[in-house]
Amino acid sequence: MNPLHVPIVVRHPRGGPGRRVAAEPVTVGLPFPRGALGDVSTLVLLDEAGAGVPCQASIAERWADGSVRWAHVDFQSHGTAAERTFYLTTAAPSSRDRHRGLAISDEGDGLMVDTGVARFRMEPRASTIFADVSGSGVLATGALGTIVLVAEDGQEWTVQIARIAIEREGPIHCEVRLEGFAGPPAEALVDVTVRVRFFAGSATTRIAVTLRNPRAAEHPGGFWELGSGGAVYMRDVSARFVPCAPASAVVFAAEANDELHRVDGAVAISQGSSGGGAELNRSWESRMGRMPNFLIALKGSIPSSAP
């Protein structure tokens, strides 16, 4: 197989002189020609100067001959440059950087993830995503991340964590899966899966929440109407992260390439249906004839950095 030489350009929208990017997680999906790559264990990432950059790769799909067809590559970008170029190549496995920046340990029937600058403890039978957060790189400590569901009758149900498992583990990032439910224990309204990704040398996490209705759906005649038998109506679902100290301001950007803005009050982001407004498309109406409004409210969030 011929050596690979794949350039990867990373642009930091807010990078540049005086604005340092530290341990910024980067994930890319790369296709490979048939027979070009036998296994991801030989992949090596280099920076502009030819120095090795720790990376983590996983196979997403293989060709019929067993070679890699698609792979995911994770690494981290540092520095003050607004644009950086990395190069993915191959080398003997023995020459690869064996960097490890993550430590996962058992804590009773729970887990502790140490990224080097922050420690995250997760426990079953907890009512928060993180039973405890600590470390020099965090802006909020203690128990964090409450997921709350508001049912049709207005009653609030806090998601209860039942099981925890390591779903992916590596030198750059790891992913932990938390499974739980919201509603009465005997008959939950929804099953909840929370996937949390941690990154070496960073207090940043990526959190994905999936709600699943465990009841069989009823669709007479094959018509998938909102509110059909077996459906669950929820007035609201929210993930709440309350900082340990009140914030003086909120810093936000509406788009990835926009400048950060600082405000002293609350910020609300409203997302409408991709099908257009209520006067154009009724496909998002609930069974009660109402058009939902997707709202993200930031109130008292601790700003991570100001421009």
Image (cartoon, grey):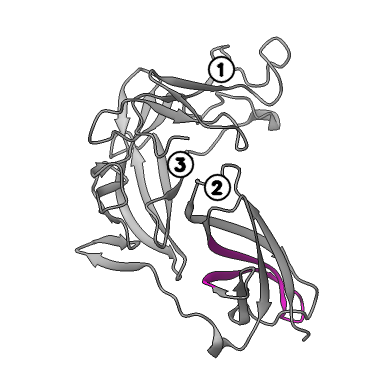
Callout 1: SS = loop
Q: CA distance from mark 2 to mark 1?
A: 53 Å
Marker disc for residue 287? 1
Q: Residue furthest front?
A: 17
Among the two numbered marks 3 and 1 on one chain, the one whose residue lies closer to the N terminus = 3
Callout 2: SS = loop
Query: Callout 2 environment at 10 Å: few (<14), some (14 to 19), or many (20+)?
Result: few
Query: Which residue matches tag 2?
Result: 17
The answer to which of 23 and 286 lies nearer the viewer is 23
The residue that appears at 68% across and 15% down in the rendered structure is 277
Q: Is residue 156 left or right of residue 268?
A: left
Callout 3: SS = loop
Q: Position of residue 241 (x, y in %)?
A: 33, 35
User: Does 301 appear above or below 178?
Assistant: above
The residue that appears at 35% across and 46% down in the rendered structure is 180
Residues at discs 3 and 2 in contact (Cβ within 8 Å): no
Quadrant of the image occupied by residue 110: bottom left
The verdict on residue 28 being magenta is no
Residue type at mark 1 is: Arg
Q: Residue furthest left?
A: 108
Marker disc for residue 214? 3
